[in-house]
Image (spheres, rainbow, N blue to C red):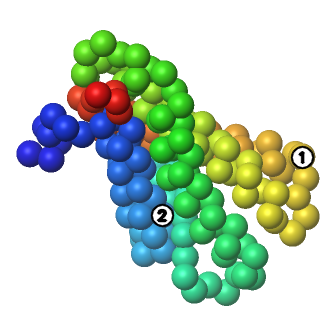
Amino acid sequence: MALGNRFKSAPGAGTMAALILVLVFGSTWYANWVSHNTNPNTAGGWWLRLLAWPHWTFNSSDSLREILVADLRAILVVVFTALFLYLLPGSQLARARGTISQFFAGWASYIFAGGFAALVTTLFLKNPSMLGAFQSAGSGATYGLFVGWLVGLATLGGYRGTR
């Protein structure tokens, strides 16, 4: 009944979907499983590995800076998704709930969130460069493009955020 709740907001549902995606597929156990059990040269293996892009970790042999940057990227994906869902007018201006504009607003917000989270966290790396920032933003936008439709589906049917 949670999916059919008439009182859910489109931005709230999309943010919750982004949080679940980051918590489940960004976890260390999922990243380890996908790296050992999938083939990156197949479409399915590539997509399953892409799901783990905003990874987060609590213990690692990496430097503290790299751990914080990875965790910050995962946090910023969720925060920027919420921000863009509130800022993109598609879900707010839709006359009826469940319109295709809500789907595209949710999807676009996840594309922008992935790109901007990667761009911002690149600044905290040891030797940030403009090329590295652009490449990182490109990988974040790729993640948003191929995974963001799930956030778009979650925003369908929600009210516009204001009554």
Residue that mark 1 sits on? 130
Name the spot of residue 84 as percent of width and height, x first: 54, 36
Q: Is residue 138 left or right of residue 28?
A: right
Q: Residue at x 62, y 84 (%)?
A: 60
Task: Examine the rendering and report whether any part of residue 19 can be seen.
Answer: yes
Q: Is residue 101 left or right of residue 73?
A: left
Residue that mark 2 sits on? 26
Specify few, some or many for label 2: CA neighbours under 10 Å numbering under 14, 14-19, or 20 or more. many
Q: Quadrant of residue 38?
A: bottom left
Name the spot of residue 69 as percent of width and height, x first: 69, 67
Q: Amino acid at mark 1?
A: Met
Q: Is residue 53 above or below residue 55?
A: above
Q: Is residue 88 left or right of residue 96?
A: right
Q: Residue at x 91, y 53 (%)?
A: 129
Specify few, some or many for label 1: CA neighbours under 10 Å numbering under 14, 14-19, or 20 or more. few
Q: Amino acid at mark 2?
A: Gly
Q: How many marks?
A: 2
SS assignment at label 1:
helix
Give me the C-alpha separation between circle 2 and circle 1.
Answer: 26 Å
User: Mark number for residue 33?
Assistant: none
SS assignment at label 2:
loop
Q: Residue at x 62, y 59 (%)?
A: 73
Q: Residue furthest top?
A: 95
Depth check: give the residue in front, 83 or 62.
83
Quadrant including the C terminus: top left
Task: Examine the rendering and report whether any part of residue 37 can be seen.
Answer: no
